[in-house]
Image (cartoon, grey):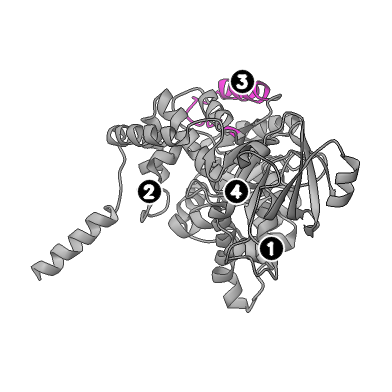
């Protein structure tokens, strides 16, 4: 690689050189292709997609009308995909810290129920901004419980400039046995966003027992016909598995199988507590999983057997579950959790060899959320959702194994630019066409009001109060 990054070959502020009404010919030091990192490769971006990807010299010859934008010290890589998010929970993120599992009843349902229309929009846009800053160009929104039109979430994602797989919650066990209204809403949702550039419709069920067997089967069929996914939290916690056993005599994934809801359209969130039989069901059905390692560490009962899934050919992506919007740290957590949970006990020093987690954070995630034909790779015809990452600093300048280094040493501070659908969305962590700091200020104001009126129940005090209480107990002894 060349020495320090220098965007000086073109005049004017650097962001202006990356905006083009026609097309861009980008020439980084390294381009991360589906076949691996390629030195001296370039990409032509036009009309929201990669028009061409290949050796820089060849593209410069075949596109003489384009002025090359040289990006020394940078790699061009596909944007990351967050395969499981809750965009409207961002106001209460830190409230979940230190809490036991199954916090949705005590925290998330009350919090989302306290959101009004402005709060939904601001919370979702704040989450989208954090995701973009962390290198995510696509997020899968698992469905809000806020009593508002989901178009507010779509508008927030659209205005922020992030690609969003937008879930509509289709729970119907409280519908008096008549799921007709739920299914009619699901059909309208799939049609409503069928032609959008950045918003991709999806259906969602909170947990399998939240929907009747009829609805589980019908939503699976509807999503499959529409080329969409159904997002369901599956086998996440011990309590959820036991509820399903009591109610149906089957584990959650087994119940989905019996209901006819397993198939390539299913995106099973978490899937941490799987029997060998359930792994076989996933493999045979073609269903996908969102492996959420940070959520497992923060509030889970187990770590999903992702290395086994990879070996069995089970489709999976990586998800944050709204924990933190940092894609590089998510990829590191994916490898680290496998090493702690499985690798150390078996002497597996590779645990996916780095590239596994990088691939499932991008292309594998795109496939899991139903967008494998559209995004997740820097290749001709794919959507131009990508990052420009500065690798000239001390963390990665001495490069020996780029995929491993991105997984273990990459961080969001190295992201110079984020592109979604061929448009520059963020430059050095800030939006290029809207006021990010103003949004953060408004979110800080609204979040306090929302949390104050939400009937949230926490098991543990905040860390500050816990420390104070311990000091008081010590002083009293």
Closer to the N terminus: mark 1 or mark 3? 3
Q: Position of residue 271 (x, y in %)?
A: 58, 53
Which numbered disc, 1 or 4, marks the residue closer to the eye? Answer: 4
Which numbered disc, 2 or 1, marks the residue closer to the eye? Answer: 1
The reply to whether the magenta stretch includes residue 189 is yes
Q: Residue at x 42, y 53 (%)?
A: 101
Closer to the N terminus: mark 4 or mark 2? 2
Q: Position of residue 59 (x, y in %)?
A: 86, 45
How many neighbours does mark 4 have within 10 angstroms: few (below 14), some (14-19), or many (20 or more)? Answer: some
Hey, which quadrant is residue 425 in on the image? top right
Regarding mark 3 in the picture, which secondary structure is present there? helix
Q: CA distance from mark 2 to mark 1?
A: 31 Å
From this view, report whether residue 337 is shown above or below residue 71: below
Residue annotated with mark 1: 403
Residue annotated with mark 3: 184
Q: Position of residue 62 (x, y in %)?
A: 90, 42
Q: Residue at x 56, y 42 (%)?
A: 132
């Amino acid at each position: 690689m060349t020495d320090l990054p220098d965007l000086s070959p073109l005049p004017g502020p650097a962001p202006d050189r990356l905006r083009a009404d026609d097309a861009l010919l980008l020439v980084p030091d390294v381009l991360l292709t589906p076949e691996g990192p390629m030195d001296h490769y370039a990409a032509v971006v036009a009309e929201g997609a990669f028009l061409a990807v290949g050796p820089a010299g060849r593209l410069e010859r075949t596109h003489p009308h384009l002025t090359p934008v040289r990006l020394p010290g940078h790699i061009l890589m596909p944007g990351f995909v967050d395969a499981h998010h809750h965009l409207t929970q961002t106001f209460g993120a830190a409230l979940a810290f230190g809490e036991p599992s199954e916090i949705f009843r005590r925290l998330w349902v009350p919090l989302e129920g306290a959101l009004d229309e402005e709060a939904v929009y601001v919370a979702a846009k704040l989450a989208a901004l954090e995701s973009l800053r962390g290198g995510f160009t696509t997020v899968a929104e698992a469905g809000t419980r806020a009593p508002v039109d989901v178009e507010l979430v779509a508008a927030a994602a659209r205005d922020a400039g992030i690609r969003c797989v937008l879930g509509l919650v289709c729970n119907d066990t409280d519908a008096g046995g008549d799921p007709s209204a739920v299914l009619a809403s699901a059909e309208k949702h799939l049609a409503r966003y069928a032609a959008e550039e950045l918003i991709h419709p999806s259906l969602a069920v909170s947990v399998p027992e939240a929907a009747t067997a009829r609805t589980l089967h019908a939503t699976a069929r509807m999503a499959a016909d529409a080329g969409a996914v159904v997002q369901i939290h599956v086998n996440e916690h011990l309590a959820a598995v036991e509820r399903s056993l009591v109610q149906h005599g089957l584990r959650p994934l087994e119940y989905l199988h019996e209901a006819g809801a397993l198939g390539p359209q299913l995106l099973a969130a978490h899937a941490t507590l799987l029997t060998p039989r359930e792994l076989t069901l996933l493999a045979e059905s073609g269903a996908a999983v969102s492996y959420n390692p940070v959520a497992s560490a923060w509030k889970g009962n187990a770590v999903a057997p992702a290395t086994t899934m990879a070996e069995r050919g089970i489709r999976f992506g990586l998800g944050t579950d709204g924990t933190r919007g940092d894609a590089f740290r998510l990829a590191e957590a994916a490898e680290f959790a496998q090493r702690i949970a499985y690798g150390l006990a078996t002497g597996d020093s590779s645990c996916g060899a780095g590239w596994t987690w990088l691939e499932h954070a991008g292309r594998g995630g795109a496939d899991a959320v139903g967008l494998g034909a559209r995004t997740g790779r820097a290749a001709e015809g794919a959507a131009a959702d990508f990052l420009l990452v500065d690798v000239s600093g001390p963390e990665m300048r001495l490069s020996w194994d780029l995929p491993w280094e991105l997984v273990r040493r990459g961080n969001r501070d190295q992201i110079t630019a984020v592109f979604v659908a061929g448009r520059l969305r963020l430059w050095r962590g800030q939006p290029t066409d809207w006021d990010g700091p103003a949004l953060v200020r408004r979110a800080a104001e609204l979040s306090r009001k929302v949390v104050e009126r939400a009937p949230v129940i926490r098991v543990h005090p905040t860390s500050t109060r816990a420390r104070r209480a311990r000091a008081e107990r010590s002083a009293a002894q």
